[in-house]
Amino acid sequence: VQLQASGGGLVQAGGSLRLSCAASGRTFSSYRMGWFRQAPGKERDFVAAIDWSGTNYADSVKGRFTVSRDNAKNTVYLQMNSLKPEDTAVYYCAISTKFLTSVRGVYDYWGQGTLVTVSS
């Protein structure tokens, strides 16, 4: 399984970005998909996740970020609104073959990351 994240860039505080993550594989609809982020010098933290039963968000992004998926395109999205400087990080998408979770270690496959920079 391969993951390709895209859509990062530089945006002013209060702005929006949409990240995309395209996955290979014929069973995309069965994947539990997660988004994580890693700021410089910090650990990789959970942002959001989605499977067929629902979604899950970190408290820090609830109400601002929305995760969605298009199974026909093998793609998961992260719509990020009302961005803040503290959202600056490399964003990673990942696949869990086990269950929907916020726990980084459960995820089996990872993309290469896309950088989001939010200026104040």
Image (spheres, rainbow, N blue to C red):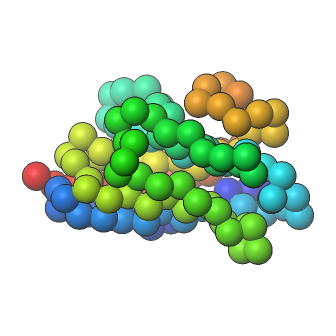
Q: Is residue 92 above or below residue 16?
A: above
Task: Please tell me which residue lies in front, 35 or 64.
Answer: 64
Q: Is residue 60 left or right of residue 34?
A: left
Q: Is residue 15 above or below residue 107?
A: below
Q: Is residue 29 left or right of residue 120?
A: right
Residue in the picture at 35% in, 51% down: 64
Residue in the picture at 66% in, 46% down: 54
Task: Please tell me which residue lies in front, 52 or 79.
Answer: 52
- Residue 88 locus on image (x, y percent): 29, 46
The answer, for residue 115, to whether it is visible in the render is: no
Q: Is residue 67 left or right of residue 26?
A: left
Tell which residue pokes out farthest to the left in this image: 120
- Residue 4 locus on image (x, y percent): 62, 61
Residue 5 in which image quadrant: bottom right
The answer, for residue 60, to whether it is visible in the render is: yes
Residue in the picture at 49% in, 39% down: 57
Residue in the picture at 26% in, 53% down: 83
Tell which residue pokes out farthest to the bottom in this image: 72
Q: Is residue 116 left or right of residue 2?
A: left
| Number of numbered discs overlaid on the protein picture | 0
Task: Please tell me which residue lies in front, 102 or 56.
Answer: 56
Residue 75 in which image quadrant: bottom right
Residue 23 in which image quadrant: bottom right
- Residue 35 locus on image (x, y percent): 54, 45
- Residue 15 locus on image (x, y percent): 23, 64
